[in-house]
Amino acid sequence: MSSSCEFKFDRANAIFYSGEIVTGRIVLKTSSIKSVNRIYILFLGLAKVIFEEQRSDTTSGNEVRYERVTSHATEMYVKSHTNVYEKGRLPDGTHTFPFSIPLPLECPTSCVGKYGKISYELSLVMERFLRYNNVFIRPLTVLQTYNLNLHPEMSMPIEHEAIRKLCCWPFRSGPINLHLAIPFSGYAAGQTINYKVHIDNMSNRDVKGFSMTLIQIYEFRIRHERRIVSSYYRGEFEPEVVAPEHKRTIKGHYIIPSLPPTSLAKLIIQVSYMIRLTVLFSGWHMKWNIDVPITIGTIPLTQSGDRNAPKEYIPDIKDIQRHTVGDPPPSYNEHQPLFEHSAFIGKLFVDPDANEYNRTDDFLPMYPVYRNMPLTKPTIEGSQTEMAASEAAPSEVTPEASPEASSEASPEASSEVTPDTAPKTPPKE
């Protein structure tokens, strides 16, 4: 029987907020006496980005040669090294090593993409004499609190107007005027975005309906080069018809899946989000995509809850409205929010430097998800963007691969290295 190791944390799940202390114990079981140089606990929190670049070189004969070069970038956020057993003979049996590791307030949220990841791993390393080392690794999720209540701009509504002309001369028709209204600029995972779309159809075509998509944009940086990967999370199609020469105001809803929050600082891995409203027309006309930025946080706005929801859990705002270098960990007066594994589309990052016996490439972080959060502060009556809670029970949003997502996997798609001045917007459908 070989040695085995179990990581036990002082909480039900291995999820911690920046600024907290990671505590627990490691239980090592050995079946025979081990000669060791030392045993230590290592905790690493870092971001790693790896991708290939194509570089050109001109030879003396003016011949241009191209070569593929693998580039690396790393950012360290926390590193803790604690010796727990000195040089000697480790008897067989069960050995328990407690740990207590503080997390800095600036630790960014765990996340994983195609070209890199922000990860936090707790390891027990047993250095052996004249043999390979025994390394046991346990990944965990670290969340940087993004309390939307501490950012007043998040409570502002999103108002977006757009005009589309379907035809040109000699088949010219009137335009379609569209006004999109979203109650707030920031939401948390699990919340429902109740939005309104006002359409003034002055064209000669029917508006057949619309849908909303959340676009997640990962940006991976190595020095002055970057790669951008977009994932698409589609909502339900709303089959609402607006006939020519008619106006309508239509309500829709979108449930935000479990995803990492918007990045707070400029790092080598950054996450941002866009909301895309897609409008479909009758006939051969292409669909109309309208993109607006939106923020995903870890603590929702108190005024963004549901009037009809039961009081399941509410972030205790009085305990978290403290302005520090980073937002403090959240406190809950009843129950903690649900935590769900990250929704993900595409390929996961494979770390070429990871231990081949203890790989953690398939680890997906978990994020707080707020469903049925009660309304704790009344909205202002008569507001232009005030939305009533959806009468019909919304169904779950499931990630769905899109043409953009499939094309992104090809070498010609968004995996191409782009200069630092390239616009940070997703491709149009």
Image: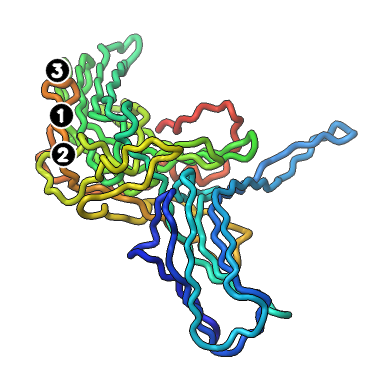
Instruction: Say what amino acid the circle numbered 1 marks.
Output: Thr
Instruction: Say what amino acid the circle numbered 3 marks.
Output: His
* Above or below, comparing residue 411 to residue 26 in the picture: above
CA separation, marks 3 and 1? 31 Å
Q: Which mark is residue 379?
A: 1
Q: Where is residue 134 in the image (x, y as percent from the top left)?
A: 60, 75
Between discs 3 and 1, the one toward the N terminus: 3
Does residue 107 appear in the picture of this structure? Answer: yes
Q: Position of residue 304 (x, y in %)?
A: 21, 36
Instruction: Say what amino acid the circle numbered 2 marks.
Output: Leu
Q: Residue 375 carries which label?
A: 2
Which secondary structure lies at badge 2?
A: loop
CA separation, marks 1 and 2? 9 Å
Between discs 2 and 3, the one toward the N terminus: 3
| 2 left or right of 291 in image | right
The residue under label 3 is: 246
Which secondary structure lies at badge 3?
A: strand
| 189 left or right of 264 in image | left
Does residue 357 appear in the picture of this structure? Answer: no
**Viewer-nearest of labels 2 and 3?**
2
Badge 1 crowding class, 10 Å Cα cut-off, few under 14, some 14 to 19, many 20 or more, is some
Q: Residue at x 60, y 66 (%)?
A: 355
Q: Where is residue 330 in the image (x, y as percent from the top left)?
A: 32, 47
Which secondary structure lies at badge 1?
A: loop
* Residue 374 image-quadrant placement: top left
Q: Where is residue 34 in the image (x, y as percent from the top left)?
A: 62, 85
